[in-house]
Amino acid sequence: MPYPHAVENDVIVRVYAAGFTPGELDWPATWSDRDGRDRTPSVPGHELSGAVVELGYGTTGLSVGQRVFGLADWTRNGTLAEYTAVEARNLAPLPVDIDHTVAAALPISGLTAWQGLFDHGRLTTGQTVLIHGAAGGVGSIAVQLAREVGARVIGTGRASDRDRALALGVDTFIDLQTEKLEDADAADVVFDVIGGDTLDRSAALVRAGGTLVTIVMPPKVQPKDGRAVFFVVEPDRARLTDLVTRLREGRLRPFVGAVRPLAEAPAAFAPGKRTPGKTIVRVAED
């Protein structure tokens, strides 16, 4: 791919590490721009950590040479490349003591967990939250954030996830392969990252006045006396700064799984292969 062009308020980032979502090759936005026009060949990946090498016209708040991390636009070429153009407002400064591999695992998982729990779920101290996929990339951060505000956490997953989920602070763990989801206690917030039948069955677990939050699809089944929210994560520089502060202070740990070189990025999208943690593509060494 050619070296990207920085439009107004953009920066060009030299990418050192990048993250992606396995299903993004099925998203229409991966293959078209904001006006629906085809933009293949397309560069996937939307999380990055790297350094600013160029500023577009009118760009403020960042400087050439600065370490940054953040979330790239859904409808432009992404982060699985040596260089990418990103709106400056989508990036936050990265402290020098945070490794790029760890930083690249934080934007989507961290922002999704925060926005799902607090912006949409309105979770507060003393409430109960049920988090599906509690040992996964989004779920593991959601567990840590919920525990920090003093919520009781019910986590779900597979049997192999139990020990990790409990170590993160889950109060009760439900193995979705061998245990009944319906046996779980009612929750003020149910946070879904699975969709399908699990999402449909989760509606009955929402307490009166509570919220079912999902990032997969608009819910077909509504809570009887609550509300349901489907959302897509949004960039947020201030929240990224807050999350990386928690990371530096040891209050938050992203779950980094496999780290692969850029040449192996296509294989990382292979369907049907479940790997624990967030797979990160190491593009270059700092």
Image: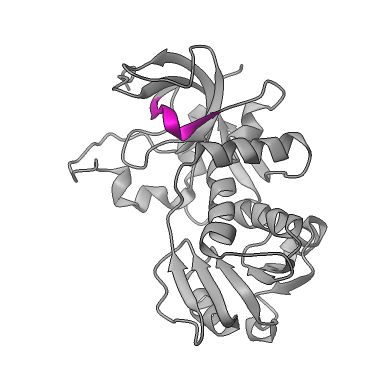
Of residue 232 and residue 30, the one placed in the foreground of this image is 232
| The quadrant where residue 55 appears | top left
Q: Position of residue 213 (x, y in %)?
A: 51, 67
Residue at 64% x, 81% y: name it: 181
| The quadrant where residue 56 appears | top left
Residue 86 sits inside the magenta stretch:
yes
Let me know if residue 235 appears in the view. yes
Colour pattern? one colour
Q: Position of residue 111 (x, y in %)?
A: 55, 47
| The quadrant where residue 229 appears | bottom left
Q: Quadrant of the N terminus?
A: top left
222 is higher (above) or lower (below) than 262: below
The main secondary structure of the magenta stretch is strand
Residue 184 sits inside the magenta stretch:
no
Q: Quadrant of the C terminus?
A: top right
Horizontal side of residue 262 vs 248, given as left or right: left
Residue at 65% x, 75% y: name it: 176
Q: Position of residue 26 (x, y in %)?
A: 35, 53
118 is higher (above) or lower (below) than 45: below
Let me know if residue 273 appears in the view. no
Residue range corresponding to the magenta coloring: 85-92
Horizontal side of residue 111 vs 32, given as left or right: right
